[in-house]
Amino acid sequence: MISQFFVLSQRGDNIVFRDYRGEVPKGSAEIFFRKVKFWKEDGEGDAPPVFNLDGVNYFHVKVVGLLFVATTRINASPSLVLELLQRIARVIKDYLGVLNEDSLRKNFVLVYELLDEVIDFGYVQTTSTEVLKSYVFNEPIVVDAARLPPLGPASIFVQGNKRMPGTAVTKSVVGNEPGGRNREEIFVDIIEKISVTFSSSGYILTSEIDGTIQMKSYLTGNPEIRLALNEDLSIGRGGRSIYDYSSSSGGGTVILDDCNFHESVHLDNFDSDRTLVLVPPEGEFPVMNYRMTQEFKPPFRINALIEEAGPLKAEVILKVRAEFASSITANTVMVQMPLPTFTTRVSFELEPGAVGNTTDFKEATKRLEWGLKKIVGGSEHTLRARLTFSQESHGNIVKESGPVSMTFTIPMYNASKLQVKYLQIAKKSNTYNPYRWVRYVTQANSYVARL
């Protein structure tokens, strides 16, 4: 049971606010944003998703830069409320097509109508887009796709040799296209977030993949779908290693630690032929979530070295090597490294011919930042940084620096080798042939190299 629900922008503006029970002060949104912005209890870093302040429990999730928040005075289950916030965001996105501040402001009447159907007096009624279509009939005001920020290569969907821009999935599931007809198509995302920790000598200490198969359907009549995965897929740790560097996708046994499925998925044939059968509900939903902690080939190798170069000086050498095929390109790569607290100045030296690189020294946080617009598979990039200190180090500068962390996005690559082999849609007629689009995206969750 929740008392209030509200959505805040990055500036703290109140975009949506609904008070269901009148138990929490009206200024809770301002109190919450001030607390989150100036969070000091746990040193530097973001506020936790759940915290208590003056007897009020605050729950929040961040979705595309917007803060979705719920408040209550009772001891509600955190996982339940956080899941509710994620589902509300998903329902709003299903209806509006695009979830951002502009679309919320333009469609505030529709958003409030959805909230009144989803929650009644603080109690959840439904978060199903399919059920809500029976009660909410307003059509959204569509945000012009041309005004959306560029999505980059990771947004490209693929069907054979065809390509589809990521903006195609920003359509509302309830609004009609010009001409009154909707294009029959379905989008499947295989999104993996990887966590890797390297030792100072380059060995892998820990590795983990958190993945999800996400689906968004624009099919009319809810036809049955058969989604086939790798035939050699194994669930549960059998003690075998899959440290197979021969391929980054497709071949090789895939061993998952555990997984769970959407309630609409039928698993009758899953044990025999690894096929998921489902009737997709309206809107966007996760077909399958999975986790893998077996060894896998990391997409990048990071080598970092810091050594003294005279009194009050030191030199840092960072090397990043892409371990994937040359046909694949990573983008929005950012490498960060904390430096000793007495660092006052940093000068950078890039390799000759380097294009699309940015370097910066954040003096307030004593952090080195190296941005690379893109990295082609098989390439290696090097950065040299010369540090100037305000005082001599009385300890080990290696211990006072690092670890090196890295964020990136790699389209059309998945480290686990999990693949959608085929996507069959039950035919309504001989001429029925909807479009099927599949996209693979790998992102860094925690990618760290120790010095």
Image (cartoon, helix red, strand yellow):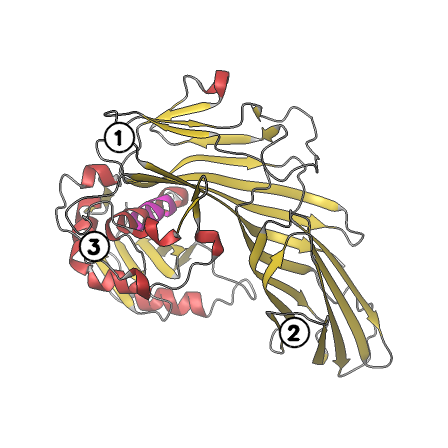
Q: Are marks 2 and 3 in contact (CB under 8 Å)?
A: no
In this view, the mark in front (2 or 1): 1
The amino acid type of the residue labelled 2 equals: Lys
In the rendered image, which quarter contains the C terminus?
A: bottom right
Mark 1: amino acid: Tyr
Q: Secondary structure at mark 2?
A: loop
Magenta region? 82-89
Kindly state the secondary structure of the residue where label 1 is placed: loop
- Label placed on residue 111: 3
Task: Give the distance between the C-alpha atoms of the residues marked 2 and 3, in whole angstroms.
Answer: 43 Å
Mark nearer the N terminus (2 vs 1): 2
Residue at 35% in and 54% down: 167
Distance CA(mark 2)–CA(mark 1): 60 Å
Q: Residue at x 65, y 35 (%)?
A: 294
Label 3 or label 1, whichever lies nearer to me, is 1
- Rendered image: mark on residue 366: 2
Residue 11 image position (x, y, % from top left): 36, 71
Mark 3 residue element: helix
Q: Position of residue 251 (x, y in %)?
A: 61, 31
Answer with the quarter of the image where residue 304 lies.
Answer: bottom right
Give the alpha-carbon distance from disc 3 to disc 1, as whole Å. Answer: 34 Å
- Up-down: is 289 above or below 43? above
